[in-house]
Image (cartoon, rainbow, N blue to C red):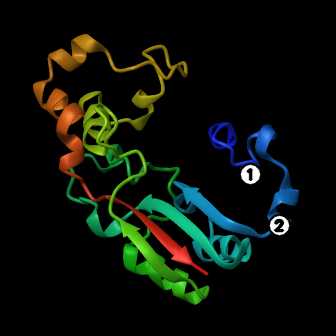
Amino acid sequence: MRFLREKGYSNAFGYDPYVPEYADASLLEERYDAVTTWDVIEHVEDPRGFLESMTKLLRPGGLLVVGTPNAENLNLNHPNLLSVPELHQPYHRHVLSERALLHLGRENGLRLSLRLHRWYLDTPYPFLNTAFLFGYVDARGGYIDVLIENTTGKLTGDPPSRGFLLRNPTLLFKAFFGYYFPKKTNMTLCFRR
């Protein structure tokens, strides 16, 4: 939200009931031109009800952006399913297929405007793509928490160890070129009301 406001978007609001700075429930009584939810729907108990509540936040013609793992492209033959980041058990309650999410959109009177088969953090910038990030997770033992924790278990946001990267040429390749080999295990669907 700070970034958007710094860019001049004074009518940008965020809601998260678990973060006091963004827990103002009165925001859910307003209507908006655009609503975004990245990595949320897979955590809720009732995806159908969640999408319905997001649709009600839209003005006519409004845009709803939903980013989430795509069940259709997950490898369920992975030797350690607990290390598949898109499954992220026990936190992901529902991993929807693209077809299921499109169906939920239609149920709510939404029409598809755009579909992307990438995670929102999948960029052409070095080290900021899913091939690298998930490759790093896999190389560090398969637990997604390595992206935000150091070896003591404290949240740090520290960058990956240079020595570790230099000993892993495949990971270095993914850091610089992974964007061009998307996994397609995530999707972003943009709906219009």
Give the left or right position of residue 128, taking residue 106 as reference: left
Instruction: Quadrant for residue 27, please give it.
Output: bottom right
Position in image of residue 96 (x %, y %): 44, 70
* Amino acid on which the number 2 mark rests in the picture: Glu
Position in image of residue 166 (x %, y %): 17, 16
Instruction: Quadrant for residue 188, please give it.
Output: bottom left
Instruction: Quadrant for residue 155, please give it.
Output: top right
Write the residue at 64% across / 63% down: 35
Give the left or right position of residue 67, taking residue 185 as reference: right
Residue 122 appears in the rendering: yes
Q: Which mark is residue 30?
A: 2
| 12 shown above or below 124 | below
Q: Is the Cβ of the residue at disc 2 closer than 8 Å to that at disc 1?
A: yes
Q: Mark 2 vs mark 1: which is more N-terminal?
A: 1
Write the residue at 54% across / 65% down: 65
| 183 shown above or below 19 | below
* Amino acid on which the number 1 mark rests in the picture: Phe
Position in image of residue 161 (x %, y %): 31, 15
